[in-house]
Amino acid sequence: MSLVARHLEANKIPTVIAGSAKDIVEHCGVPRFLFSDFPLGNSAGKPRDLVSQERTLELAFQLLESSFAPRTTVQSPEIWSPSHEWKLDFQNVDRIPAEEIKRRRLEFDKIKEIGQQVRDETLNTDAN
Amino acid sequence: MRHSRPMDKSQVTNKPNTLIDSEDRILESVPYMQRLKDYYLALGYGNPYQWASYSEVPFATLTKPLSESKIGLITTAAPYKEGAGDQGPRAPYNAAAKFYKVYSGNTDQVDFLGISHVGYDRKYSTAEDINSFFPLEALKRAERQGRVGQLSARYYGAPTNRSQATTIKQDCADLLDLLRQDDVDVVILVPN
């Protein structure tokens, strides 16, 4: 998505990314980034929380209107929950038992195989 | 010559490299690049993913007020795919639900969009409310309130390819074409 935002801006279309993977987006370098410090999957606001969703969108609008230079990041003031365990848990190898790591390796090999099949099917459809 | 001062112990936390506030909340964001690198190395995969990085960043300024602009929404969410298994809330990671081509849909009629094909946080998040990852309803309200001039008749789907070359050569060009067809002035991108 960062690459898409960059391409659109280079073609004169202003963009704002609303997302949660701050390091990845900023590492790439994008014009405007509204950062919600939430678990991945909630870039548009908290689930079942209309106020949070509207606030998030409004912040994105304000960022579009007020930014004057690229790499402008605004952090939403919203907090996901009183506990920040989610930050320590996500894909953290220090918190995953060895047996579980082995299981996930097998699972991920299958996932990659399926992904490749879907990709091949798409390319074959295009070729026909 | 500079002299080091004795450290004020009251400011030192017992969590090295972690900023916490007075309520013991972690202030730093999750270091996803490091986590994912460590994760896949632990699983036994070599050759860690190289995240895109640029020194130059393009920047386009608004040419008119938002209240007079047409806004487009780009999502990484996927439409329902027949025969591809569970794609709804709480679905396990589902590679069969992935898509590899840019698509568009009608903003007046969105029956289903899912994120089972991406690595969102499944422990703390369920994807049960589409509005938490696809802000269509909030955008429609903004349109009704006149905060934005108009919502584009279509929303646009961006594949989550691992290949940056494909994203740049194919997907970026396809998305730009669609946005130009629809005369979109400004875009919000919501990755998951």
Image (cartoon, rainbow, N blue to C red):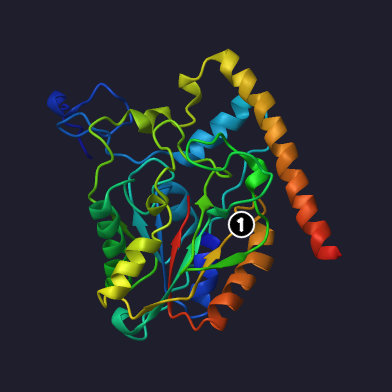
Q: Residue at x 25, y 74 (%)?
A: B145
Q: Amino acid at mark 1?
A: Pro
Tell me residue B38's x, y (percent).
55, 30
Up/down of B161 relative to A112, above or below: below
Residue, disc 1: B159
Up/down of B25 relative to B151, above or below: above
Tell me residue B37's x, y (percent).
56, 35
For numbered disc 1, what is the local secondary structure? loop
Q: Nearer the viewer, residue B149 or B41?
A: B149
Q: Residue furthest right?
A: A128
Q: Residue at x 52, y 59 (%)?
A: A1
Tell me residue A113's x, y (percent).
75, 38
Q: Is residue B46 visible?
A: no
Q: Nearer the viewer, residue A124 or B129?
A: B129
Q: Quadrant of residue B27?
A: top left
Up/down of A96 relative to B132, above or below: above
Question: Relative to residue A71, is residue B13 drawn left or right?
Answer: left
Tell me residue A93's x, y (percent).
51, 24
User: Which image quarter is the C terminus of chain A in?
Assistant: bottom right
Q: Quadrant of residue B174?
A: bottom right
Mark 1 crowdedness (10 Å alpha carbons): few <14, some 14-19, many ≥20: some
Q: Is residue B132 visible?
A: yes
Q: Residue at x 64, y 65 (%)?
A: B171
Q: Callout 1: residue from which chain? A: B
Up/down of B86 relative to B155, above or below: above
Count of residue discs? 1
